[in-house]
Amino acid sequence: MTIILSLTYGALFGAWFVLWRVQDRGFQPIETLTENLENTATDAWVAKAKQAAIELATNGDEVSADAVWNACPPPAGVDGRAMARVFSRDEWEIAGRVMSERGRNKARMIALWRLKSREMIAA
């Protein structure tokens, strides 16, 4: 009986702690995130960021999300996670991985991207 109560209290505390951390960090419900990612300001920024990424890759260089972020930072109100839309798997391929230089990424590994075709550079 004691073991069951301990496990139950542990599970309740764990669930409360997770919910508290989610609220503390400002995470949004998925519906809100989806609306935010699809708004017109985000679409406009993604188009600019894609162009910046292509310009950075003009010499056949590999491009990271950090480089695009520095060249074209997202404006206020645009969720930075929209950066995932910049590197489409149809146009880009992963060339390697490097440690992120941005402080908010906490030095985690990010992809280095290379354009699949040279026609994208000419466009």
Image (spheres, rainbow, N blue to C red):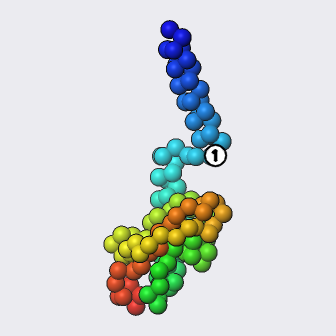
All told, the count of numbered labels is 1
**Residue 42 in the figure: left or right of residue 17:** left
Element type where label 1 sits in the image? helix
Identify the residue at horizontal 51%, vertical 66% (top origin): 110
Which corner quadrant of the image does residue 104 belong to?
A: bottom right
Nearer to the camera, 117 or 123: 117
Q: Nearest the camera: 113 or 45? A: 113
Would residue 10 be found to the left or right of residue 50 on screen?
A: right
Residue lying farthest top?
1
Are there few (<14), some (14-19), or many (20+) residues within 10 Å of tag 1? few
- Quadrant of the drawing holding the C terminus: bottom left
**Quick one: 12 or 89, which is closer to the camera?**
12
Quarter of the image for residue 118 reads bottom left
Quadrant in which residue 66 is drawn: bottom right
Say whether residue 35 is visible.
Answer: yes
Q: Residue furthest front?
A: 3
Position of residue 88 measured from the top left corner of the image (x, y, whole percent): 39, 70
The answer to whether residue 78 is visible is: no
The answer to whether residue 26 is above or below residue 60 is above
Instruction: Write down the residue under mark 1.
Output: 25
Rendered residue at 54%/11% (across/down): 2
Q: Residue at x 49, y 53 (%)?
A: 35
Give the x, y percent position of residue 107: 60, 63
Indicate the position of residue 84 as horizontal and vertical percent values: 47, 64
Q: Amino acid at mark 1?
A: Arg
Q: Residue at x 38, y 75 (%)?
A: 92
**In the image, residue 29 above or below residue 46:** above
Expressed as whole percent of the image width and height from the top left, the position of residue 6 reads 55, 17
